[in-house]
């Protein structure tokens, strides 16, 4: 299918062929008929991408801080690779569209194939011929509303949410500062609510347009805005001011303070500096409010991705209900887009639309809509990568999932190994798959995992998706006769683990990304303690926090950091001891500490089959300057310390033996052994029995925390 993309480094726009999305539970597959180009959000994004590297840094100091934080934690090389991957990536554009439903995923009640729907959401309702959109970001289009009108439903919901934040009541006077598209829609929505409306803009054309829509008073900024507002309101001032302008300075904020009556609401919808002058806002005790996009539910993964609606008795107007209300306003003619849609551009001419929005073409505009053919041939699911020759080798590797770790670590290592051909790549987004294929040299990008699992040319599959799908994909790939590398964890539940292990009984070509056992530092410690008998192993992980809303903390998707990351260190303990785990006891920080619910501050005690014992302390509460990982091992009169997999010190008979390297956590060695398993019939890097032991012990640790008792393996 065709999709509009932008290169973040160069700012270049293109209409790319990308794999079409597959239908999946929780959402709708939609063929796009029209999509709206935002003159605010999208213009900002396009303008930022077209800036120099210095310009990008000045525009986004928050991202510069993130880079500096990463530099402290991960060093120069890893930080450079992450920044380069970000800069070279292809970004989707668009967040408001309309089309017809082609397929309805499981759990999407109230929708049917053929329905006309409006779609919302950056990353979902893109400028693309086919869309997969979660159900809470879709709403049916009423009869009589055209697709090109419905394509503006998200933008209309943004305007409507600003009105709701203003709490504008019948008969009140509201000033709208900024009469662009959202401002014009805000004016019409306020008029439909029975409000008296005053509009202000620097552009006389937009002022005139607002007058054509029946505004009570529309003024150019250079006119006596304050005097006329107070005359119209009998000297009281406006009951609310909604700022829909985008401005480089705080003039709209200053003006709002002058226009508002005592204790009025000032609502920020547009992008303006929040430099609030204290005196007028303090003396009038003004209520300053920000309007968050298109309503409650925005940025909530549970609402947007999982379809968990808010009860209407508690949250009357969600983003979905705001979209629906705007569409009904179009249906009843309370809002009209007839004079606001100024340009209709065929998808194939998309660059003309962005030249207009960015100001490269000096022409007046407001609503710009991209038009798509409503019917067309089926979109191809496999997209060959230009310039990459179709070859076959001993290890034809395909990836299902290709996030930051896969793109920054796994794929670059594989490209260095002999006998490896990068065949196909599939990600949740067809654009990400296409981008990965182009940047790393995969022969093709595909639309769904089945395109890889059914591919006879692929004999090696890497699974680097979100954790909840690891087990099912690994089992299916094993049953297809392919060698499988699964990024940790292997499974989130005992049932998932059983499914993978059953498949591995017939095809043991399975490895999990437990890379630390392959580090030269781990090998040095094992060699130093060979024959030492039972060991005492202490592992401290100063992991640092990750946002509470991250999918990693979601029990159903990421499993939490215990299942998702502590499994590394459980496997490391058994690798150092050369024995498997037989008993687990775990405890975590409890109430009243709010960190207790995230379960990323835990202590785990392991008993191993050779009599060794291990303790793992994993915390998100420490200072990053301490270093992340420290391993201490004692046995047979020998002490060994691994410090962040950079330095290993072995103490014996009062003498110290040191190993110093660049940080080496064993990724290269593990992948080398895995590929040799495929190309040279070598044994699996990790036995299935060890994979079972580490995975089951990790699941048991979570069970132990819940039970408050030890769990036998």
Image (spheres, grey):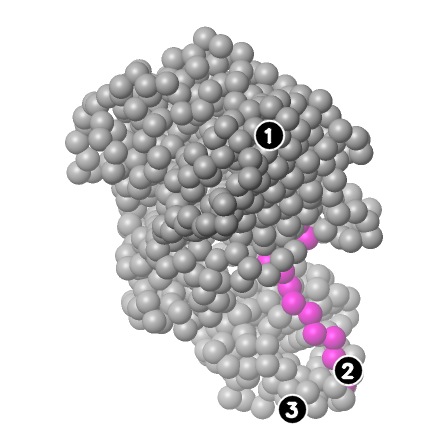
- Looking at the image, residue 231 sits to the left or right of residue 488; the answer is right
- Which segment did they paint magenta? 284-297
As for residue 443 lying within the magenta part, the answer is no
Which residue is denoted by mark 1 in the rendering? 534
Percent of width and height locating residue 551: 59, 43
Q: In the image, 393: left or right of 612?
A: left
In the image, residue 285 lies in the stretch drawn in magenta: yes
Q: Are marks 3 and 2 in contact (CB under 8 Å)?
A: no
**Residue 234 appears at what percent x and percent y?**
76, 87
Task: Indicate which label's residue lies in the foreground, 2 or 1.
Answer: 1
SS at circle 2: loop
Q: Which residue is mark 3?
A: 227
Pick the residue in front: 233 or 501. 501
Q: Residue placed at 77% from the left, 70% from the top?
A: 171
Q: Which mark is residue 285?
A: 2
Q: Position of residue 374 (x, y in %)?
A: 40, 35
Q: Earlier in the sequence, mark 3 or mark 1?
A: 3
């Amino acid at each position: 299918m065709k999709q509009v993309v932008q290169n973040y480094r160069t700012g270049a726009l293109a209409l790319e062929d990308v794999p079409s999305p597959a239908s999946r539970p929780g959402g709708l597959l939609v063929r796009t008929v029209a999509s709206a180009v935002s003159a605010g959000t999208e213009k900002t994004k396009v303008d930022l991408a077209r800036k120099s590297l210095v310009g990008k840094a000045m525009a986004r100091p928050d991202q510069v801080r993130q880079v500096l934080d990463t530099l402290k934690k991960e060093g120069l090389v890893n930080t450079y690779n992450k920044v380069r991957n970000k800069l070279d990536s292809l970004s989707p554009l668009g967040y408001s569209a309309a089309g017809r439903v082609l397929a309805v995923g499981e759990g999407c009640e109230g929708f049917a194939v053929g329905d006309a729907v409006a779609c919302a959401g950056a990353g979902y309702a893109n400028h693309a011929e086919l869309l997969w959109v979660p159900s809470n970001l879709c709403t049916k289009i009423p009869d009589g509303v055209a697709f090109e009108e419905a394509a503006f439903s998200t933008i209309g919901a943004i305007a409507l949410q600003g009105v709701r934040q203003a709490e504008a009541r019948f008969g009140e006077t509201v000033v709208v500062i900024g009469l662009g598209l959202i401002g014009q829609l805000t004016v019409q929505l306020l008029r439909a609510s029975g409000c008296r409306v005053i509009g202000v803009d620097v552009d006389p054309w937009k002022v005139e347009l607002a007058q054509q829509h029946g505004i009570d008073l529309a003024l150019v900024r250079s006119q006596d805005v304050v005097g006329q507002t107070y005359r119209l309101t009998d000297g009281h001032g406006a009951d609310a001011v909604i700022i829909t302008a985008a401005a480089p300075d705080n003039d709209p904020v200053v003006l709002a303070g002058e226009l508002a009556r005592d204790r009025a609401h000032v609502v920020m919808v547009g992008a303006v500096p929040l430099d609030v002058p204290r005196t007028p806002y303090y003396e009038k005790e003004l209520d300053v409010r920000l309007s968050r996009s298109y309503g409650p539910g925005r940025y909530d993964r549970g609402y947007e991705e999982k379809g968990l609606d808010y009860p209407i008795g508690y949250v009357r107007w969600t983003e979905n209900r705001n979209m629906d209300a705007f569409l009904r306003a179009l249906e009843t003619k309370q809002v009209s887009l007839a004079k606001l849609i100024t340009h209709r551009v065929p998808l194939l001419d998309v660059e003309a639309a962005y030249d207009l929005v960015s100001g490269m073409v000096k022409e007046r505009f407001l609503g710009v809509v991209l038009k798509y053919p409503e019917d067309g041939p089926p979109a191809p699911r496999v997209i060959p990568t230009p310039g990459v020759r179709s070859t076959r080798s001993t290890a034809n590797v395909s990836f299902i999932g290709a996030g930051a770790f896969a793109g920054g670590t796994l794929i670059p290592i594989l490209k260095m190994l002999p006998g490896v051909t990068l065949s196909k790549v599939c990600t949740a987004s067809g654009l990400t798959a296409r981008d990965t294929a182009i940047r790393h040299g995969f022969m093709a990008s595909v639309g769904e995992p089945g395109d890889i699992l059914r591919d006879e040319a692929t004999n090696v599959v890497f699974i680097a998706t979100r954790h909840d799908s690891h087990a099912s994909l690994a089992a299916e790939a094993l049953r297809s006769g392919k060698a499988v590398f699964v990024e940790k964890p292997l499974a989130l539940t005992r049932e998932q683990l059983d499914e993978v292990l059953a498949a591995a009984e017939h095809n043991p070509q399975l490895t999990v990304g437990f890379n630390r056992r392959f580090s030269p530092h781990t090998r040095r410690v094992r060699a130093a303690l060979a024959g030492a008998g039972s060991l005492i192993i202490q592992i401290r992980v100063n992991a640092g926090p990750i946002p509470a809303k991250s999918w990693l903390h979601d029990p159903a998707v990421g499993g939490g950091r215990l299942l998702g990351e502590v499994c590394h260190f459980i496997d490391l303990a058994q690798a150092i001891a050369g024995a498997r785990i037989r008993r687990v006891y775990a405890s975590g920080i409890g109430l009243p500490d709010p960190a207790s619910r995230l379960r990323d501050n835990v202590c785990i005690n392991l008993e191993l089959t050779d009599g060794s014992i291990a303790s793992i302390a994993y915390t998100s509460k420490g200072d990053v300057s301490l270093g992340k990982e420290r391993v201490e091992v004692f046995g047979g009169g020998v002490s060994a310390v691994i410090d962040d997999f950079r330095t290993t010190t072995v103490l014996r008979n009062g003498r110290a033996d040191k190993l110093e390297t660049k940080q080496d956590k064993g990724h290269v060695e593990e992948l080398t052994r895995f590929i040799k398993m495929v190309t040279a019939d070598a044994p699996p890097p990790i036995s299935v029995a060890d994979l079972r032991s580490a995975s089951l012990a990790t699941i048991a640790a979570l069970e132990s925390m819940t039970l408050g008792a030890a769990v036998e393996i």
